[in-house]
Amino acid sequence: MSSPGTDDLDPQDVINRHVSVGGEDGQRYMRLMEANPAALGTPEGAAFLRSLAEAAERITDRELGVLLDADWRCRLVAGWLIGVDRRERFRAPVGARLLESRVVFAGHGYCFALARLGTADDADILTAYLDNYLRETKLRYDQDSAFGALQHLDARLGTHRAERFTQPGGLWQQWATANRADTTDHKQRIDILCFLVQEAVDAHRASRGTGDPA
C-alpha cells in the first residue's frame, strides 16, 4: 500500500525532520516507542510532547504519506502525529495498516491515533483488529494497545464493545494467558497518554495565542 502524491518528496529529508530529529527530542521514535506515561508526565516529558504537538501541526499530509510508506520507526511516529493533530482523513490508511500488521511496533502508534480520533468508526477498526488477532494466540503484536484503546473509546463514547472480549474464558483472557501478557490496566495507560497529549496541544496553542477548542 502506498500513499498518493509523495513521489517528488525526499523521503530522507522527511525522516530526518520528523523521525530522527535531534535536539531536545533526541530520537523521537525511541521516546514514542516507550511512551512511558510516568516519563512523559515530567517537565522534560511535557516539553517533548509540546514539540510533538508543534510537529504534528506543521507536518503536511504528503509528508505523513511518506512516513506511512516507510519503515516501522516512521510509521510509529506518523501514527502519533496523526493522533496528536487528529487528522481524521488518515483514519482509513491507519486502520488498514493496523489490520495488516506487517511491521513491528508501528501498531502502537496506530492504536494511539485511533484512540485520539475518538469516534465509533475508530472503535469499529479496533474491534475488528481484536476479533482477528486475539484469536492468534501464538502472535504477540499490538493486541494490548488495541484493547486499551478500545476501552478508552468505550468510556468516551458510552459504549461496551470491549465487553465481548472480556467474558470469562473469552478471547482477551485466552490471548493474555497464552502470551503471559501484562494484565495491568491498559485503558489507564491510554487515558493518561491522551490526557498528557491534550495538555501539550493546549499549551502549544496558548504559546502562539490561539484558543482553538480541543
Image: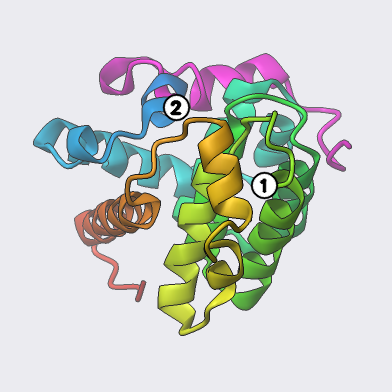
Q: Circle 1 sits on which residue? A: 134
1 or 2: mark nearer the eye:
1
Mark 1–mark 2 Cα distance, whole angstroms, equals 22 Å
What segment carries the magenta color?
A: 1-28
Describe the element under mark 2 as helix, strand or loop.
helix
Q: Position of residue 46 (x, y in %)?
A: 20, 41
Q: Position of residue 1 (x, y in %)?
A: 89, 37
Q: Position of residue 76 (x, y in %)?
A: 56, 32
Residue occupying the point 73% across, 24% down: 70
Q: Is residue 10 above or below residue 62?
A: above
Residue 10 counted in the magenta span: yes
Q: Is residue 105 visible?
A: yes
Q: Residue furthest bottom?
A: 158
Left or right: residue 44 versus residue 80 is left
Of 4 and 154, nearer the camera is: 154
Q: Circle 2 sits on which residue? A: 33
Q: How many marks?
A: 2
